[in-house]
Amino acid sequence: MSCLDFIPVRIATLMPSSHIGVDLYQAEADCEEFVLYRGGDYPLTAKDLERLRGRGVEHLYIARKSQAVYRNYLREIATASDGNEVPLGVRTQAVTEVVRQILQESFSEDDIDKTVNAASQLGTLTTEILTNDQFAVKDMLRVLHHDYATFTHSANVAFYCGMLATELGFSDEDVEDITAGGLLHDLGKLDVRDDLLRKPDRLTELEFREVRMHPTLGFKKLAHRDDLVEGQLMMTYQHHERLDGKGYPVGCTEDEIHPWAKICSVVDVYEALTSNRPYRKSLPRQKALDIMNREVGKAFEPELFRCWQSIIKQS
Ligand SMILES: [Fe+2]
């Protein structure tokens, strides 16, 4: 079998003594060779995991054809009803991994049905986790990936939207919808040329104009659907609007901007500042908050920003 026949699984998602049901392999010689590490019938022990971590191993591998089995395992871990059995760190890792996989797949196939479906699944999963008493924001912040890719950014924004909405006291149902909306907010970027999104240099005026089309493009993609609510559409359409009217695509102000879009705008900018970009390294949390603080009342709703700031500072 070649390296294309294997996919990596993160050690952090593996629970000791749980049956994943697939053979686990270790990669050798720069992923040229894969050696059986543990047969599917034999569970990993806590010692095994400790040893692997001690050796700096972050991934084991499974055969690509077993991907569905691993995904089921992740789902079980992510939604396990007894929070005591699955440590929250593993649980949140499992959730982000499920979401990453589904999103990566649906974004790369440009399949809107799949993406909307993934968004609603993420909404449900996240709400379950956020309403779990043992939930710690810091667990979530620790496991979110911070590389630059539209689907990673979208998944992070979705979680952040869920956190902020929960803290603001929205109902579970709204938190689900807001989280799912967060996942969809940048959908229009799928229609923007990839080289523009990855360009390390300053964009020209014309290129900027193209990138700024993404809220409208996303809105058009989703507007006809009856499985989304207005707030979610507005998150897609208005997440780059500013209170002072200097945003895009319309330049609307204050009350003309949907409250959910205002939530999305705060966490979107925070996520962008704290993750690595082609043109900039990630900023520390405090630095990002300081930069955003200058825009409070101009770009961001003061109450929302303060609430987000307190979430980040607590964790
Ligand atoms: Fe955006």
Image (cartoon, rainbow, N blue to C red):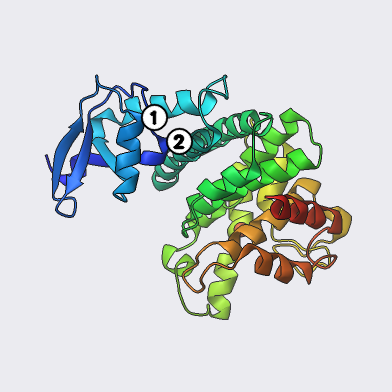
Image coords of residue 138 (percent x, y): 62, 46
Q: Does mark 2's beta carbon lie closer than 8 Å to ligand 1?
A: no
The quarter holding residue 174 reads top right
Image coords of residue 157 (percent x, y): 61, 50
Image coords of residue 149 (percent x, y): 46, 57
The quarter holding residue 180 reads top right
The image shows residue 66, relative to residue 49, as above or below, that is: above
Q: Which mark is residue 71?
A: 1
Ligand 1 quadrant? bottom right
Query: Closer to the camera, 300 or 292?
Result: 292
Disc 2 residue type (three-letter): Val
Instruction: Identify the residue shown where x is 42% and y is 45%.
Output: 104
Q: CA distance from mark 1 to mark 2?
A: 7 Å
- Do the CB atoms of the residues marked 1 and 2 lie less than 8 Å apart? yes
Q: Does mark 1's beta carbon lie closer than 8 Å to ligand 1?
A: no
Image coords of residue 103 (percent x, y): 46, 42
Horizontal placement of 262 versus 153: left or right?
A: right
SS type, badge 2: helix
Please tell me how crowded label 1 is: few (under 14), some (14-19), or many (20+) other residues with Cα within 10 Å: some
* Residue 59 visible to an observer of this rendering: yes
Disc 1 residue type (three-letter): Arg
Instruction: Identify the residue shown where x is 75% and y is 56%.
Output: 309
Horizontal placement of 305 versus 49: left or right?
A: right
SS type, badge 1: helix
Query: Closer to the camera, 241 or 169?
Result: 169
Q: Which residue is mark 2?
A: 98
* Residue 184 visible to an observer of this rendering: no
Horizontal placement of 107 versus 269: left or right?
A: left
The image shows residue 95, relative to residue 211, as above or below, that is: above
Q: Which quadrant is home to the N terminus?
A: top left
**Tally of numbered discs:** 2
Please tell me how crowded label 2 is: few (under 14), some (14-19), or many (20+) other residues with Cα within 10 Å: many
